[in-house]
Image: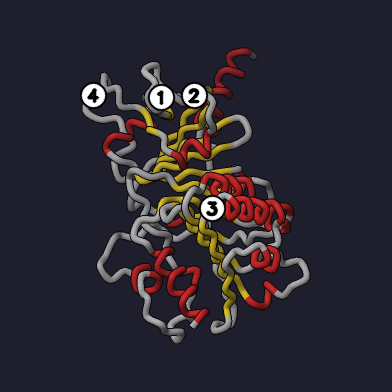
């Protein structure tokens, strides 16, 4: 009987070891996405100490300011699928022993999954309640489209001088005849190797909490273009930023602003500059620019229902080519013209 049990375990183990499906990323509370750099991947030899992702502000926001060990499911998606269970170690140092600004990093195991990873592949960190899933998707593989479909974005485009993204968002030409477009086809800006993009899902508090944290961290400017704003917690943070001297500007939709639950008038009455759409059918954007460098966008309106009951997403990433800044400036001038 024991021999039969052992035999069955050996037969079942390979099947159980490949339980990960890319669709399960939708169950994560938060996701970080990054194009792997040479310094992110194991290379040269097994003696290399190169087995970590260095953290930045985006990554710290995801994993927190406490050193900890995570049970980690490692997955590689390429022509062949690899999956292994292990751990990863998150280190956060607020200050070094010499008093310098601290660093953060996620140390991963040198296993078959991470040995297969190469610069240019897409690394995905899925955070769940008590563990992580570290997925490496081979660049240009058939899994890339599926990945971005699950995350609610389009694949990262190659940089071209006349890219669709640049033509649609990088112009200040005052035309409205090109606005009847399929917004689902708009790609996410290229994520460079040195940056992580964080993605959160609702129902749940993560979008709301991270928007509030971004507002509270801003020191110079906050530009907001959001269709519907009815969330008291977010508006309280915007008003606090305005009072401490941060330049806050709001663009919203005129129909939504006249709604019973809208808080646009509260912002305007406090002296926050507000402009409303008077020239498009609707102003359906949901994005914000913090200190002229960090972006929040996604399907998430700044409403309580988007937090508590809707299926939404929000993303945070550094702005690279002023796509959102140019669009905000265009709309601000256009609606006041």
**Which residue is the site of mark 2?**
87
**Location of mark 4 (residue):** 45
Q: Distance between the residues labelled 1 and 3?
A: 46 Å
Question: Foreground: 67 or 245?
Answer: 245
What distance separates the C-alpha of mark 4 from that of mark 1? 14 Å
In terms of sequence position, does the residue under pointer 4 or pointer 1 come before the other? 4
Q: Which residue is drawn at 35% across and 27% down?
A: 51
Horizontally, residue 157 falls left or right of residue 87, namely left
Q: Is the residue marked by circle 2 packed among few (<14), some (14-19), or many (20+) residues within 10 Å?
A: some
The residue lying furthest to the top in this view is 2
Q: Which of 313 and 44 is in front in this view?
A: 313
Q: In which quarter of the image is the N terminus?
A: top right
Q: Mark 3 points at which residue?
A: 245
Evaluate if marks 2 and 1 touch, with contact meaning CB atoms under 8 Å apart.
yes
**Mark with earlier residue (1, 3):** 1
Of residues 86 and 56, the one nearer the viewer is 56
Check contact, mark 4 vs mark 2: CB within 8 A.
no
Residues at marks 3 and 2 touching, judged by CB atoms closer than 8 Å: no
Residue 109: numbered disc: 1
Please indicate, yes or no, whether residue 284 appears anywhere in the rendered image.
yes
Q: Quadrant of residue 259?
A: bottom right
Image position, residue 265 (x, y; %): 69, 68
């Amino acid at each position: 009987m024991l021999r039969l049990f052992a035999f069955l375990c050996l037969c079942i183990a390979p099947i159980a070891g490949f339980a990960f499906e890319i669709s399960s990323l939708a169950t994560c509370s938060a996701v970080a996405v990054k194009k792997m750099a040479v310094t992110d991947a194991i290379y040269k030899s097994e003696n290399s100490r190169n087995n970590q992702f260095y953290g930045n502000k985006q990554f710290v926001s995801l994993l927190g300011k406490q050193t900890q060990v995570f049970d980690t499911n490692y997955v590689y998606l390429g022509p062949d699928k690899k999956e292994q269970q292990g751990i990863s170690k998150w280190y956060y140092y607020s200050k070094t022993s010499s008093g310098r600004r601290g660093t953060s990093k996620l140390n991963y195991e040198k296993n078959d999954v991470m040995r297969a990873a190469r610069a240019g592949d897409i690394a995905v960190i899925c955070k769940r309640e008590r563990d992580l899933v570290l997925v490496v998707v081979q660049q240009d593989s058939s899994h890339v489209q599926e990945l971005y479909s699950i995350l609610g974005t389009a694949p990262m485009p190659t940089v071209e001088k006349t890219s669709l993204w640049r033509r649609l968002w990088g112009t200040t030409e005052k035309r409205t005849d090109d606005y009847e477009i399929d917004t689902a086809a708009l790609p996410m800006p290229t994520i460079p190797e040195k940056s992580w993009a964080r993605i959160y899902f609702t129902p749940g508090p993560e979008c709301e909490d991270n928007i509030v944290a971004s507002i509270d961290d801003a020191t110079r400017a906050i530009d907001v273009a959001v269709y519907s704003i009815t969330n008291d917690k977010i508006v309280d943070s915007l008003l606090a930023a305005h009072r401490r001297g941060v330049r806050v500007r709001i663009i919203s939709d005129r129909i939504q602003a006249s709604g019973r639950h809208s808080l646009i008038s509260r912002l305007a009455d406090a002296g926050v500059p507000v402009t409303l759409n008077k020239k498009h059918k609707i102003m359906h954007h949901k994005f914000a620019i913090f200190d002229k460098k960090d972006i929040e966008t996604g399907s998430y309106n700044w409403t309580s229902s988007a937090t508590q009951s809707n299926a939404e997403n929000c993303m945070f990433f550094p702005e690279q080519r002023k796509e959102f800044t140019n669009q905000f400036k265009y709309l601000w001038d256009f609606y006041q013209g």
